[in-house]
Amino acid sequence: MEALKLLGILIVVIGFALKWDSILTIMAAAVVTALIAGMDPLTFLQTLGKSFISNRNMLITVVVFLLTGTLERNGLKEAARGVMAKVKNATAGLVFGIYGVFRVIFAAFNVSFGGVAGFVKPVVMPMAEAADERGDHKISRRHREELKAMASGMENVAWFFGQVLFVGTSGMLLVQSTMADLGYTVELPQLAAIQIPVAIVAVAVTTVYYALIDRRLTKGDARQLEAEAAAGTKGDE
């Protein structure tokens, strides 16, 4: 009898495997699980409402995805690439460096741009690609994949070190409590002041490192494109 309570999981697996409507599949699984557990309709609705309230922050992520997708469909990437066409001597390394500076500043005020999915992919990546594809230059598949990794890396570095500059974040409170357990009393503003040079050095080192990698990849694009074309030709044969 206890195994019957797992029937909802089986419904979800079958529904996703057969590509049924996701929302209807999940709701069907929830209803079946509630019936098997002997839950009355009022309790079931109360449980759904409680789960909705406790996980409402997840809806923000859904809204960001929908908004980003709508903007991309209506030319967000093309607009981002168009901005780089007006900037002379720009490179992907420079784009990442500028983004890192702005990211760490806004992170210090606990303001998020939407992360990798909401901002890096639809805005930063097209700008970086456009900067390296200036003129007749074409970037290789390997170069493009490296740009994706560097864009995500800069997002992580700037956000990780920048958010701790905001007094009262969970990271700051964790550091303060850890120091207190070790016998050191440290105020949050003092921790933020100590973190400032650390954040600056982290973003600066990452910027220089990515700029050097991007420069090396740009120089080797022609050779890499030839190798990729040769590999494609052999694959077709």
Image (cartoon, rainbow, N blue to C red):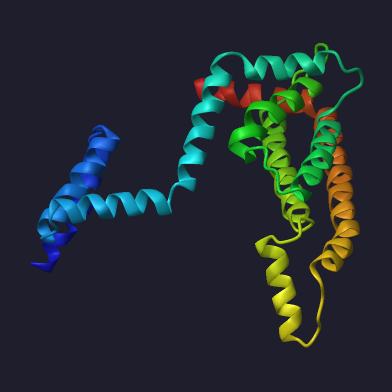
**Along the line of sight, which residue is nearer the eye, 45 or 217?**
45
Above-or-below relation of 197 to 28: below
Residue 172 relative to residue 60: left or right: right
Residue 198 visible, this orientation: yes
Q: Residue at x 49, y 47 (%)?
A: 57
- Percent coordinates x, y for residue 60 in the rendering: 51, 40
Q: Position of residue 38 (x, y in %)?
A: 10, 60
Give the answer, above or below, for where 37 lies relative to 9. below
The quarter holding residue 3 reads: bottom left
Let me know if residue 227 appears in the view.
no
- Residue at horizontal 75%, vertical 18%? 138
Q: Residue at x 88, y 24 (%)?
A: 90
Residue at far bottom of view: 183
Name the residue rendered at 73%, 54% in the picture. Answer: 163
* Closer to the camera in the image, 16 or 164: 164
Please identify the residue farthest to the left as the structure is shown: 1
- Image-based side of 217 in relation to 55, left or right: right
The count of marks equals 0
Position of residue 140 relative to residue 185, above or below, is above
- Depth order, front residue of 43/88: 43
Instruction: Write down the quadrant of residue 196 in the picture.
Output: bottom right
**x, y percent for residue 218:** 82, 28
Counting from the top left corner in percent of width and height, residue 186 is at 82, 76
Q: Is residue 193 left or right of residue 112?
A: right
Which quadrant: the N terminus? bottom left
